[in-house]
Every structure is written in structure tokens, then in C-alpha cells.
Amino acid sequence: MGKRWLPGKRERDAQSCCRTQRDSALEISPKATKLEKLLQIPKNGTRCAVAALTRNCWKRENSRARMDFLTLFSIYLGLVLTALALLCACSGRKGRVLSSSASGAGQVLSLVIPTRLQRVTQWALHRLFHTRSCLFVVLHMALQAAVFGEYTWEVFVYCWELQFPLPLLLLPYVLLAGSTGGFLLCSRTDPGIITKSNHASLVKMYAYDGVLFQKGVTCPTCKMEKPARSKHCSLCSACVHRFDHHCVWVNNCVGALTARYFLLYLCTLAGAAAAIAAITAALLTRVVLLSGVMHGSYIDEQGQERAVDILFLIQHLFLTFPRIVFMLGFVTLLTLVLGAYCCFSLYLAFTNQTSNEWYKSRRYGCSHHQALQPHDRQVGYKNIYSKGVWMNLKEIFTPPTVLERQKKT
């Protein structure tokens, strides 16, 4: 007959014997570092093979570990899907596929959710995305504090024990200082609000292209003629010169005076996320190589001995360093999202476009628009504001003097 699980006292004796054999084989020094004790790496460098445990001990520990891993992974997947839903809600009209999917899901949920709860949810979403609120600023600061807290508390300490270069470990803090400065400047600076005192000068600043911006159009709220490249922001209740978009994460508009600070904030934030992801990935790779876990084996649920594969390695790292792996997944996703948006923002800066202009021009790029041209000729949209990469960047980083004088007064 095959081996069966031993109940009662014999079960406890078997587990105790298992632990004794494992500890005697490892012979961990009492002066071992925190990382060595956590990984059970012997001081003499002997590799800790996973197959050192007996079949019965591994069978129970592996089942429990797999259950814990699936639970944590389910929670993690739910948080990622929630984040994607929030991004979809923030994207509005710009994410047609995502917004249509969210709309369809909302119609299905409306059949089972009570009417009162639906009204409360709609009111909360309206307050979040259609009114000026500091909630996303607080959320931004909380997420940043959580990531850098985990990086400082565990990743930095482990990397220091493994003798990582100190300038590399301090790089995320330098980028954090840059992103914090850009965030404060972008959130507290006047974005370029059009007033009666500067309206006459701003009307002459840019020419009307006759496609996106028509001459003689009056803002129904501000009761003033709209200068070219301006737009009324319903959240700020004002017309903004060279309007790009209203960013809920800085609780301010990105306009003529805040575009440079927003680029600084976005690039340094994406760089900080990428640096933390790279350092954390390097740490886990070094840990795997030092522990020698890839040269070991484990007992699966059917009682068969198998070599360690990638799935088991991920599960092992997730259970050994749950917070670090969770943070790595978050900052990796954040790096991809911020990196893509950063490249898009740089493309707009190099071509002297705004997000508002780029989105509007997509409609005229597919179909012709009846522009105000002689002989009633139909033309497609053409960006008339681009003057070369250098001049475009100079225009962003040296905003109009009219707005600067208004800001000082």
C-alpha cells in the first residue's frame, strides 16, 4: 500500500522530524542578515534545494500555499480590473471601446441594482469626474506614499544587503523630488485663464485655422469671443488659453502656463515608476539566483516529483515576498500606462498640438470638413501651429508674456 497521511501524534512527529532535517541541513548562522533568514540561505553558500523536505510535508504545505496564492491573485486581479474601470470612466469619449463596454455592463447591472443605489452611484460619479475635487489628489498621494514606503522598508534594505550601487537605489528618490515639484507647480499655478484684461492680446496670439477654431465664436458662459486654441473648462468655470485638458490628478487645467510643469511631472513620475520596477525586478532575479530554487524540485498534488517551473517560481516569490511582488505588478502596470501617455504628450509637444486639438482633428482626418476657404473648397485638417521641434518646445517652456504679467500682478 502507498503512503497515507498520518493522523494525530504521528502526524505531528512527522512534521517535527521534517523541520529538524531541514534546519540541520541548512545550518543558518545566528548572525545571518534579514534576507538570508527569510530565504534560509546558509552562510557557507550551500543551495537550499526544495526537494530537501519529505513528501508528506511538501504535500500539505504546497496545497496551502497554492490556495493562498490563488486567493491573493484573485484580490490582485480584482484591483487591476477596478483600476481599468476607473480609467475607462475617466477617459470619457476618448475611449470609445472601453466606454461602450462599461455602458453595456452598466445596463446589465441596472437590472439587479436598486434604483436608490443607482442614484447614489451616479451622484458620486458626477462628483468625482464632473466637479473639481481633491479626492484624486489625496488618492495620488496615498498611492505614492504606499509605493515609496514599501520600496524604502523592504526593497531598499534587501538591495543594500546584496550590495546594489547606492546611486541606483537613490535614483527613485531624485525622480520623486522632481515629480513632487512638478505636481505642486502644476496644481497651484494659474493655467492661463482668459480675462477681460488680457483678452484683446490673446485674440491676436494665434491665427484661426478655420477648421477647429472659427473666428467670431463667443463663449456662452464667459460672454467673450473665444481666442484660437482656447476652450471653456466646465470644472474651472473659465476659458483657458491653449487648453489641453483638465487633469483630475493635479486638480487643475493643463494650459499655456502649466503645460511645462505637467510635462515635468509626467516624465519624472513615469521615470520613478520605471526605476522602482527595474530595481525590484533585479532584486527578485538576484534572490532566485542566490537561493538556487530553480535547481530544486517539488511534490505536486498527485504526489509526483516535478522540477521547479516558472509558475511555481512566481507562486514561491509571491508567497515569500507578497508585498514586493504586489508592488512590482502595480508599478509595472503604472510604467506601461504612464510611459505610453508620456510618449503621447511628448509627441504633442514636438508637433505643437494639445490633447483637445488632437482629439478634434481625428474627426476631420477621416472626413473632409467645410472650412472657411474661398471658392467653397473642402479641405482636411492641417496643423498650422507647428513651427519645428525647437520652436514648439520653446513656445511651451516660455509661455506668452501677457499671461506671465497677469500672473505676477
Image (spheres, rainbow, N blue to C red):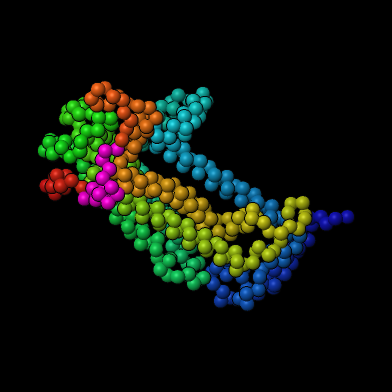
**Where does residue 339 sit, x and y in percent of width and height?**
42, 50
**Where does residue 182 sit, x and y in percent of width and height?**
30, 53
Give left or right: position of 3 versus 201: right
Which quadrant would the N terminus be assigned to in this image? bottom right
Give left or right: position of 261 versus 80: left
385 in magenta: yes
Q: Residue at x 35, y 62 (%)?
A: 174
Q: Residue at x 20, y 36 (%)?
A: 207
Q: 368 or 348: which is nearer to us? A: 368
Rendering quarter of residue 29:
bottom right
Residue, far front: 375
The correct choice, above or below, for 231 with respect to 17 in the image is above
**Where does residue 168 sit, x and y in percent of width and height?**
43, 66
Can residue 102 be seen in the rendering of this structure? Answer: no
Q: 76 or 398: which is nearer to us? A: 398
Q: Residue at x 20, y 32 (%)?
A: 226
Residue, far top: 376
Give left or right: position of 230 versus 290: left
- The residue range painted magenta reads 383-398
